[in-house]
Amino acid sequence: MIKIGIIDDEILARKVLEEYCSKINNFELVISTGNPLEFVNFIQQNKVDLIFLDIEMPELNGMEVLRSLINPPKVILTTAYSEYALESYNYGVVDYLLKPIKIERFLKAINKVATSKITEPKPPSDTKELQIKHDGLPVNIPLSSILYIQSFGNYLKVFTDARMYLITETLVNITTVLSDNFQRTHKSYIANLDRVTKASRTHLLIANKEVPVSATYKVLVSEKLESLSKI
């Protein structure tokens, strides 16, 4: 049973979501409120697996609610504000629903929840290795150990858990041998999205290092992060 919360200061919007949720067999609505502070207090004492959360609300907006939670549940935002996409990745956002919410679009979002495996951790995305030459000797680097890659003139800096490797290669060429969890974030950077611990509109945090996200790649990074969170 998936425990559901609805937080929206618009009564009509709440009623629509309550009706939709009542049609889903494995959904149990445990709180529906227009007061975000009430929800914050509730979740401190009660388990909630998924919340439908409006962004524009009095006292606390939706993103402020998410920032206040230590271990936020999965989230479906009832908003059209796509500029929150990268930041919302940090808080388990599954989808965005544009008001007025149609039942077809609601069901599509619910299907995403079903594939996001709420109670199961995401398995490692690969066990492959990157083969390079370092100081003239062949070295195999597990892809899962790579944090990010930075262009450095005619070279690349490959940052791993253990150390940094300087190799003669280009970002374009190395992309062809990397797995799907790697994404170009900037003209000079490729990041291992599986290693991201926090995301903002301009940076990804990986092992306490900030990897820049440029405007060119912002949408691609956001979509890839969202996709990987559902594996």
Image: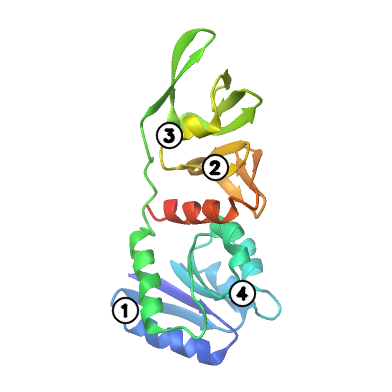
Q: Secondary structure at mark 1?
A: loop
- Identify the disc placed on residue 176: 3
Q: Which residue: 54% across, 57% down?
A: 89
Q: How is the image coloured?
A: rainbow
Which of pointers 3 and 1 lies earlier in the amino acid sequence?
1
- Give the spatial CA distance, label 4 vs label 1: 24 Å
Mark 1, residue position: 24
- Give the spatial CA distance, label 3 vs label 1: 42 Å
Task: Find out whether the residues at labels 4 and 1 contact each other: C-beta distance under 8 Å.
Answer: no
Q: x%, y% of residue 99?
A: 52, 83
Mark 3, mark 4: which one is toward the viewer?
3
Give the residue at the far top of this rendering: 136
- Give the spatial CA distance, label 2 vs label 3: 12 Å
**How would you rate the neighbour count of disc 1 (Cα within 10 Å): few for under 14, some for 14-19, many for 20 or more?**
few
In the image, taking residue 115 as reference, residue 209 lies left or right, namely right
Which of pointers 2 and 3 lies earlier in the amino acid sequence?
3
Which of pointers 2 and 1 lies earlier in the amino acid sequence?
1
Mark 4, residue position: 55
Mark 2, residue position: 184
The correct choice, above or below, for 118 with respect to 208 in the image is: below
In this orientation, which residue lies closer to the viewer: 55 or 186? Answer: 186
In this orientation, which residue lies closer to the viewer: 76 or 59? Answer: 76
